[in-house]
Image (cartoon, rainbow, N blue to C red):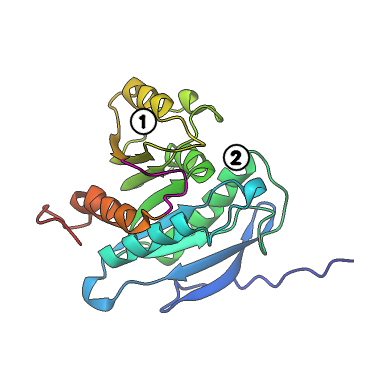
Amino acid sequence: MTEALTIEQPEEFPSEHAEFLIRGPAGAIECAVDLPEPDVELPATVILCHPHPLHGGTMRNKVVTIMERSMRELGLRTVRFNFRGVGESEGEHDDGYGETDDLFAVAEWVRRTRKEDDLWLGGFSFGSYVALRAALNLHIGQLISIAPPVERYPFDSLHHPECPWLVIQGDEDEVVNIDAVRHWVHSLKPPPELVVMKEADHFFHRRLMDLRGLLKNGVRDQLPGSSGGADLP
C-alpha cells in the first residue's frame, strides 16, 4: 500500500525558498517558491506552468527556470509546481483539463497567502495551454506564453483574456510551427504581443540568456507601479 504524502499547505507565503505540498483536486501538488531581493520586491506573484508531463516536462525544466529567474529579478515572487503525476504530485495526466484544476488550486493558495499581490501566469509549451485556459477564469495582471503548441491543443477555442499578453516563439522551433503561431496570434482580437526569437529552437538551447532579456523587457511596462523606462538587463 502506497504511503500517503504529508501535505504541508503553508498558511503563510514562505519568506525564503521553500518546496512543499499543497492539496489539489487529485491529491498532493508539489510546489517550489522563490523570492526576489528585498530592494526590488513588488506586490506581485507569478505562477509558472511546465511543459508536457509525458515528454519529461517538470517544474525544473530549463525554460521554466529561466522564466522564474527573470520574473524574480524583476521583483516578483515566483511559484512553480508539478502537474498531477509529475514528481511528488499525485494523480494522472489529464490532457490539460485536470492540470488546469491543479493550477486553480495553486492560484487559490497564492491568493489566500498574498491577498494584496497582482497575480501573473506564465507557461511553456503544454504549460502555455494550461495557463491560458486558467487565465480566462482568473483576474490576472499578465499572461506569458512561450512556444504555445497551437496545432496540438484547441487554442482556437480560447479567446483573449482580459490582461496584457506576451507570446514568445522561436523561429527554428522543431515542435511548434511558427507560421501556425503567427496565424493564431493574428486571429485574436486584440492580438497578443508576439515576439519571435531568431535562431531559437523549442527549448531555446544556447539562447536562454536571450530569452531572459526578452521576458524582462516584454513585461516591464506591466509591473505594479511601472511607468516604463530603460531596457532591463
Which residue carries the number 2 mark?
96
Which residue carries the number 1 mark?
160
* Membership of 200 in magenta stretch: yes
Circle on res. 8:
none
Q: Considering only vertical position in the picture, is 97 above or below 117?
A: above
Residue 139 in view here = no
The residues colored magenta run 198-205
Gap between marks 2 and 1, in whole Å? 18 Å
**Residue 224 coordinates in the image, percent (x, y):** 22, 57
Which one is earlier in the sequence, the residue at label 2 or at label 1?
2
Which residue type does callout 1 highlight? His
**Residue 99 coordinates in the image, percent (x, y):** 60, 46
Number of marks in the image? Answer: 2
Left or right: 38 as drawn, with respect to 21: left
Left or right: 217 as drawn, with respect to 203: left
Which residue type does callout 2 highlight? Gly
Left or right: 226 as drawn, with respect to 174: left
In the image, what residue occupies the spot 66% across and 70% down?
Answer: 7
Q: Considering only vertical position in the picture, is 92 above or below 170?
A: below
Secondary element under disc 2, as helix, strand or loop, is loop
In the image, what residue occupies the spot 35% across and 20% down?
Answer: 187
Residue 180 in view here = yes
Work out whether residue 212 or residue 26 is closer to the camera in this orientation and state it: 212
**Residue 1 coordinates in the image, percent (x, y):** 90, 66
Work out whether residue 7 or residue 228 is closer to the camera in this orientation and state it: 228
Quadrant location of the C terminus?
bottom left
Q: Quadrant of residue 208?
A: bottom left
**Residue 203 coordinates in the image, percent (x, y):** 47, 49
In the image, what residue occupies the spot 82% across and 70% down?
Answer: 3
* Membership of 95 in magenta stretch: no
Q: Magenta residues: mostly which secondary structure?
A: loop
Secondary element under disc 1, as helix, strand or loop, is loop
